[in-house]
Image (tube, rainbow, N blue to C red):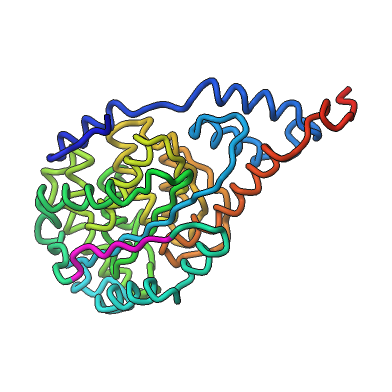
Amino acid sequence: MTPDFETLSDFAEILTALPSANPAAKADAEDRNGQLTKPPGALGRLEDLAIWYASWVGSGRPEIKSPQVVIFAGNHGVAAAGVSAFPPEVTEQMVFNFQAGGAAINQLSKAFDAKLDVHALDLDRPTADFSKGPAMSETECVAALKAGWNAVDLKADLFVTGEMGIGNTTPAAAIAAALFGGGADAWVGRGTGVDDAGLARKAAVVEAGLAQNADAMGSPLDVLRCLGGRELAAMAGAITRARVESIPVLLDGFICTAAASVLHATAENALDHTQAAHLSAEGAHSNLLDKLGKSPILSMGLRLGEGSGAALAIGVLKGAIACHSGMATFAEAGVSDA
């Protein structure tokens, strides 16, 4: 029975009772990997990825047939503080671009046969400016978590979530600072390309947000509510639903990873069904991945968001699964393994 939630406490309860990977499928995949026509370890990390994927979909010889990419879009009150090189109107304009098929994520999703869904979350009603108080009420945060939860296609066998929201590297940095410490300077980056003055404004806004919401620092989900945004909460909800349904997840860049960090901070094993798809050019992303114990699959200098890095990594994972499930064993090929 799929769990439900009406409060942040309810959602936290779900995170304490998540399903684990399938040990039998993992053992089967490891056994098959040891029999394939290659020297041990010759495919490097592709072998680890294939075994990880197999363990979550419950098959020692899996296929990837139905990947899903979901973009969540939200607007932020803190954008009025001049933390982005672009105005908030661009969020809605980019949503139209996604819907028309004109963005990078459309091309990458198409290239790897992934279904793409776009969810705009109350774009006409930005979150509150977190430098002056909580970004969202509990009701608003739960609604965003549910939007993500309900966006997961239960027929998907791989899930990617991306985001669009002008100014959202600022709440992502604030969440990271609240969860892992180090202050604003350790986590704030240039995002869409702000100049030095914009970078200083971002740092000041994050510090103000940490001070204004100090009472929320003891609860990761309250950190998300007070410092995050609707699209970040929706990503957290979607990643959790994917876990409940045993659907493997590829995490995108800094913003997606910050949203996922809330889950990790609530329950340490909450991200076992995820892989870090790529290392983005946003400076603090590497540090955030280190905090989560995640090693990126790709490092291509991307900083676009939209789920673009994770969508690109679908191709690598498909390659890993194609080798794992399609290669012959030594016995099948009549090749000596001695």
Q: Is residue 212 visible?
A: no
Q: Nearer the viewer, residue 211 or 235?
A: 235
Q: How many marks?
A: 0
Q: Is residue 220 above or below residue 24?
A: below
Q: Is residue 292 visible?
A: yes
Identify the residue at image location x=34%, y=63%: 118
Identify the residue at image location x=36%, y=34%: 270
Identify the residue at image location x=41%, y=41%: 291
> Residue 74 occupies which quadrant of the picture?
bottom left
Q: Nearer the viewer, residue 149 or 49?
A: 149
Q: Nearer the viewer, residue 280 or 32?
A: 32
For the C terminus, the quadrant is top right
For the N terminus, the quadrant is top left
Q: Is residue 220 magenta?
A: no
Q: Is residue 1 above or below residue 221?
A: above
Identify the residue at image location x=64%, y=40%: 45
Q: What are the residue bounds of the magenta stretch?
A: 116-123
> Residue 8 occupies which quadrant of the picture?
top left
Q: Position of residue 72 (x, y in %)?
A: 31, 60
Q: Position of residue 253 (x, y in %)?
A: 43, 56
Q: Position of residue 70 (x, y in %)?
A: 38, 57
Q: Is residue 87 above or below residue 310?
A: below
Q: Position of residue 313 (x, y in %)?
A: 55, 53
